[in-house]
Amino acid sequence: MLQDTNKRLQEYNTSLQQYNSNLQADVTKNGETITKLQKEKNTMVETMNGLKDHANSVKMQLDLAKSSQNEALKQKNELLKEVDNLRSELQQVREDRDHKLVEVHSLLAEIGTYKEMTGKSAVELDNVMTRSTALEEICSAQQERIKLLEVQLASTNEKLKRSDLTTIESMTEYEKQKRMSEDLQLRLEEAEQQIIDGEKLRKKLHNTILELKGNIRVFCRVRPLLSNESGAISYPKSGENLGHGIELTHNAQMYAFTFDKVFDQLASQEDVFIEISQLVQSALDGYKVCIFAYGQTGSGKTYTMMGKPEIHDQKGLIPRSLEQIFQTSQTLVSQGWKYNMQASMLEIYNETIRDLLANNRTSIQDGGISKYSIKHDTNGNTHVSDLTIVDVSSFNEVSSLLKRAAQSRSVGRTQMNEESSRSHCVFTLRIFGVNEGTDQQVEGVLNLIDLAGSERLNKSGATGDRLKETQAINKSLSCLSDVIFSIAKKDEHVPFRNSKLTYLLQPCLGGDSKTLMFVNLSPEVSSTGESICSLRFAARVNSCEIGIPRRQTQIRSLSQG
Ligand code: ADP
Ligand code: MG
């Protein structure tokens, strides 16, 4: 072991000796380097000193440059300021320029308009000039005319003065004319009144002439068509038969008739009444008056006689006659007349009298004795026993009476339809008048008779009792015609007693009385057969002279004495 360690220490001593020789080499080497570096350091110091001198001179140059730079900066700032000033000035100048430019433009535009205006004005001026010359010409012409007119005016003034005078004259003339025309107007009115009065007088005289002729007057009345059926009646459109003629076509043949008056279907109830009002008037004057309505059933007899008393336009002859009688009797009061009136209304069916004003209607024969027996007294007045007589002094009383009559007639109608068209209805108004002043008395009678239907009965359909009955009914109508024709022939014996109707009316038929017959017609083609019969009968009646009527008046003192 120790050998090992001595060996290793020997090795280590050799390495250290090695290392020491190395280090010796290094030291020599470094000594060389240091000398070299020493030399280099000396050169570098020398160079550094040269550089130091150079730096100083550069520094001096830098300072110089710095001061000159400052100077330059100052100058630059001043210059900049100046530039700014100049800029603002320039701006101002520009603005001024722009402003001026605008002004220039507007001035240019103005110049343009002025130029235009000048052009126009020149034209206008030309026009005005021409016009003014024209006006000057006119003016001179006018002056000429004015002179002329002045001359004319002078002459016109002269004329006016003259015409003023004429105007005054004309005014007086006008006044005169006006008075004359007023006078003429008055005379015209008077003349018109005279014409009206004349027309009334004419009617009266016409009636008187007819009366003097003594004929029974006949008026024909045609009712309007009631169905779609065509009519068979026409009238003369002109000539002397206008208003008097009637033409009926039957089996392609024309039949013409004339009567005292013909009323077509357009005639109103008033038109008809106007024509008979004179006759009604005569009843107040003391005449006996009979107005008959004749015609087939449905031809308008009842419409003509009674109409519909409650409807103003449709009132028939009975209500209208009563109205007129009451009115006239009122006006006659101032002349001292006092009137008393009695009305009765009866129906004759199959020779039996029915009292239409009775409260309890009993028309049946009573124990074989006819309840309503007819008697004429010596004064020519007729009395029917048990008949209801109603004193009437006002139209209101009569209208309630007419209502009563119409009611009892309609009862009869529904019960016995056949009877109503086969019975006569007689309305009688007796009028007693006394004049206290003159002591005069009058006694008139107005009979308004709605006759039974005139149609011929279909004899083939009726046999035995029925035939006898219908014959009896028809008999009363033929009795009436017998009586009329017998009076006309002036027979010794007139068969008044052959029927109730003729016996009842005896004092009112013939010479003492005024008789008028309406022949009523249905215009339908289907009625022409009956219409011809009615017209022929009426024409015969029309030609009958039955005498001149007499007024029944007397002086009271004489009659009493
Ligand atoms: P008659 O009594 O002859 O049988 P009516 O008087 O009853 O006939 O008339 C028959 C129908 O004819 C009734 O409905 C009546 O109102 C109408 N008539 C009659 N005459 C006219 C007339 N003139 N105007 C309008 N209607 C009438
Ligand atoms: Mg009738």
Image (cartoon, rainbow, N blue to C red):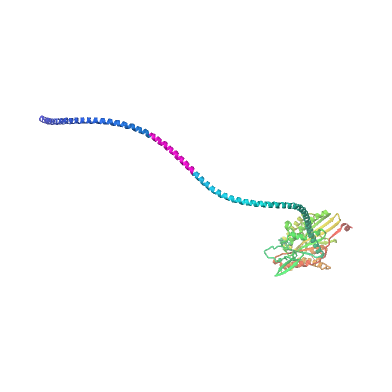
In the visual, does 495 lie left or right of 113?
A: right
Q: Is residue 49 left or right of residue 328?
A: left
Residue 335 in view, yes or no: yes
Residue name at image x 35 percent, y 32 percent: 71
Above or below, 63 against 465 in this view is above
Q: Residue furthest left?
A: 3
**Residue 462 appears at what percent x and percent y?**
72, 68
Give the left or right position of residue 510, taking residue 158 as reference: right
Q: Is residue 461 visible?
A: no
Q: Position of residue 430 (x, y in %)?
A: 81, 58
Give the quarter of the figure containing the N terminus.
top left
Tally of numbered tags: 0
Q: Name the foreground residue: 313 vs 346.
A: 313
Image coords of residue 8 (percent x, y)? 12, 31
5, above or below 95, in the image: above
Query: Is 99 within the magenta?
Result: yes
